[in-house]
Image: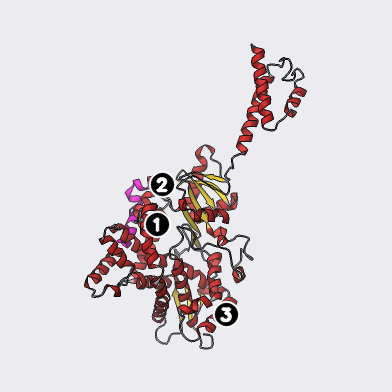
Amino acid sequence: MLCNLQLFFQTSAHVEMRKFGLGNGLLQMSRAAHPNITAVVGPPVASRATLPLLIFLALLFIFIKLSQKKSTLPGPSFCLGIGPLVSYGRFLWMGIGKACNYYNAKYGEIVRVWIHGEETLIISRSSAVNHVMKKGHYIARFGNKHALQCIGMNENGIIFNNNPSIWKQTRPYFAKALTGPGLQKTLAASVVSTRSHLEKLLGGNQTTACVDILLFLRAITLDISNRLFLRVPLHEGEIVAKIQKYFDTWQTLLLKPDIFFKFKWMYKKYEEAAQELQDAVEGLLLKKQQELREAEKLQDISDFATDLIFAQTHGELTADNVRQSMLEILIAGPDTMSVTIYFMLMLIAQHPEVEKEIMEEIHTVTGEREVQNSDLQQLKTLENFINESMRYQPVVDITMRKALKDDVIDGFLVKKGTNIILNLGRMHKDQFFLKPNEFSLENFAQNVPHRYFQPFGCGPRSCVGKYVAMVMMKGILVTMLKHYTVHAHNGKAPHSVKHNNDLSFQPNEAHGPLQMVFTLRKRTEA
């Protein structure tokens, strides 16, 4: 009986080892170490000590082969739950963008970490980034639900709305406002607003002014948004200040643990900051409703706000969704557009040869008049400059998604519910570019395939305002540069200014305003 059982285990082990490519080599090694082992097909006289060894080796080999069949995601070790705590802590401590760069630099282009105890992938490989962007089952975002409720984004608006059905219902209102007639009006609104603010800045006989550049750009971009989408009187300074507090709240709370929201005293100031802007937007919508009631012809005042108000009246959108949608279209300029243009002005000040090339093109295309829609396609150097600025010094360098079903990304299994962070800023430093780590217009001397450059994303959840954003940037830059030269106060370069890299890449304003000097151009320079 014992001999038969021993023969069975020896024969089974031999079969499994042959199945996984082990062959007779291991058995021959075992016989060399244990001369008493006979061939498994011969008389079963092997020693009792050899049997457990053979079984162990066979099972070990099977385990190794099976493990090799599954792709293992690189990243920190789980290590009894310590890994998830450390990686989550790093995001809270360093900020989202900086933590993503740390993990991609350490582990590669696709990394597995944990946020809130949930498996999270950080991706900077262009093929994987494009896969996620183009697939419809990655249209959801992730973030702490209590945080999103606090700032009004939970199932409202489109920026961080993680309810796909409500997001799909809301997005068409943005698409309508940001394309077609709205897009055609953008350039004129940008030129008029920029000129108006410049005249206020340098009134009288002044030829030079030192400017709080971010405050100045935020006021311009807010005014342009109001001219296009709302069209009611507002106090720019107050709204801009409220937008900054709102953004700080959004960035601070997004990844906070649930326990943070158990104590009112911990998040009360952030809740109040978010509510201030929400109340201000509610007041602006009430003004708009009053104008609609008093208007003789609705087509004269029809715009994004009008469409939202009518949608609420017809039961298509909730009051909260209308308020949040209006809030989001107003904050986009002061939040990211203004910082993007700030970096562009800093780069122009640092690269006079680029400024000269841009100015020659502007003078050739527009002459003495203001820029017009028909000119935009001819401003190739300016467009290359804008693209290279967004590549080299991105403001929105990450985007956050959630997998709505199981998938495979570049050979790695991704389970439903997995968080995804696309590290676009790092992807844009890809070796595809001639000088990936330098600011150079040569990087866009030839057409760049979309898979390598995605400042606005692509696919179903790409930035709905990408075309308006490009027109606004061109309008503001051409209008400023035609009439003024700019340089950093005290000769500061972009890399010498302290930054925060969290939800977006922003200059640190904690130590006071960032200043630039505007000087009226001489007629020969214009």
Q: How far apart are marks 1 and 3 (CA)?
A: 39 Å
Label 2 vs 3, first from the N-terminus: 2
Label 1 vs 2, first from the N-terminus: 1
Is disc 2 placed on a helix, strand or loop?
loop
For the residues labelled 1 and 3, say whether their Cβ atoms are less than 8 Å apart: no
Residue type, numbered disc 1: Trp
Q: Residue 250 shows which numbered tag?
A: 1
| Range covered by the magenta-colored residues | 260-278
Q: Where is residue 117 in the image (x, y as percent from the top left)?
A: 46, 43
Residue type, numbered disc 2: Pro
Give me the residue at 52% from left, 49% from top. 121
Q: Position of residue 145 (x, y in %)?
A: 37, 49
- 13 w.r.t. 117: above or below: above
Residue wearing tag 2: 257
Judged by its main secondary structure, the magenta piece is: helix
Give me the residue at 75% from left, 26% from top. 29
